[in-house]
């Protein structure tokens, strides 16, 4: 999409959702490299950063007080409590991006995705199923970021999240990364060409 076209249109919201370990971040990274008109909405969270994480990648890390202050001032498009921590989507950067003709892609859990769709029915929502629950469990174990108890909670939540997939505009099984990226890119392109 040309820069001229981007400036003459209002951008769109695109939401990618899957269970934890479903490949959202990897797919979004590839899409951002392919599409200069696509902006990634970085969420805020109250959880502590993991060893490889830093502020702004993959989240902005906030204290609980700061998160609640932003929520109460209406600065979040949506927010959820997940595993005792809070996650939310900053309103201002996303709204400024679409006003400037850019499309904004969100990496959200199912509850956050459905909340955003309720507030912005024009948003494109895509749900990624894992190839199997065994594959999902293997991915989560390979990350090595959760205790066994935390892992079991994530797997239990993943089953519920997969049951919600039919509430999204599109559903894909992420069993071939290259093919999934191509399909998501095509869905985004078609959605963004609509008036």
Image: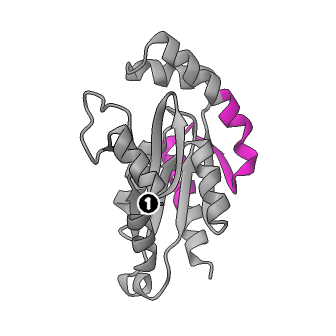
Q: Position of residue 178 (x, y in %)?
A: 48, 46
Residue 172 included in the magenta stretch of the image: yes
In the rendered image, is residue 56 in sight?
Answer: yes
As helix, strand or loop, the secondary structure at mark 1 comes to loop
> Number of marks in the image?
1
In the rendered image, is residue 132 in sight?
Answer: no
The residue at which mark 1 appears reads as 75
Q: Residue at x 50, y 17 (%)?
A: 150
Q: Look at the image and tell me in which quarter the C terminus lies.
A: bottom right
Q: Position of residue 30 (x, y in %)?
A: 39, 52
Q: Is residue 86 left or right of residue 191?
A: left
Depth order, front residue of 67/124: 67
Q: Look at the image and tell me in which quarter the N terminus lies.
A: bottom left
Q: Which residues are magenta?
A: 159-185
Q: Residue at x 64, y 46 (%)?
A: 172
Q: Position of residue 115 (x, y in %)?
A: 63, 53
The chosen color scheme is one colour
Q: Position of residue 45 (x, y in %)?
A: 39, 41
Q: Up-down: is 129 above or below 94?
A: above
Q: Residue at x 47, y 25 (%)?
A: 139
Residue 81 included in the magenta stretch of the image: no
Q: Residue at x 70, y 57 (%)?
A: 169
Q: Is residue 9 left or right of residue 70?
A: right
Q: Residue furthest top?
A: 148
Q: Residues within 10 Å of mark 1 (few under 14, many from 20)?
A: some
């Amino acid at each position: 999409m040309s820069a001229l076209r981007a400036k003459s249109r209002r951008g769109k919201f695109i939401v990618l959702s899957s269970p934890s370990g479903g490949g959202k971040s990897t797919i979004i990274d590839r899409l951002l490299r392919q599409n200069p008109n696509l902006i990634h909405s970085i969420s805020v969270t109250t959880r502590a950063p993991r060893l490889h994480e830093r502020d702004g990648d993959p989240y902005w890390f906030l204290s609980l007080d700061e998160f609640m202050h932003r929520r109460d001032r209406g600065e979040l498009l949506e927010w959820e409590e997940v595993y005792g921590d809070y996650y939310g989507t900053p309103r201002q950067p996303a709204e400024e991006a679409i006003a400037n003709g850019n499309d904004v892609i969100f990496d959200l859990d199912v509850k956050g995705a459905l909340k955003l769709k309720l507030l912005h029915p024009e948003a494109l929502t895509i749900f990624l199923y894992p190839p199997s629950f065994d594959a999902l469990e293997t991915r989560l174990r390979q990350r090595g970021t959760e205790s066994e108890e935390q892992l079991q909670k994530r797997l239990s939540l993943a089953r519920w999240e997969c049951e919600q997939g039919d509430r999204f505009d599109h559903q894909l099984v992420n069993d071939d990364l290259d093919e999934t990226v191509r399909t998501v890119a095509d869905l985004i392109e078609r959605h963004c060409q609509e008036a």
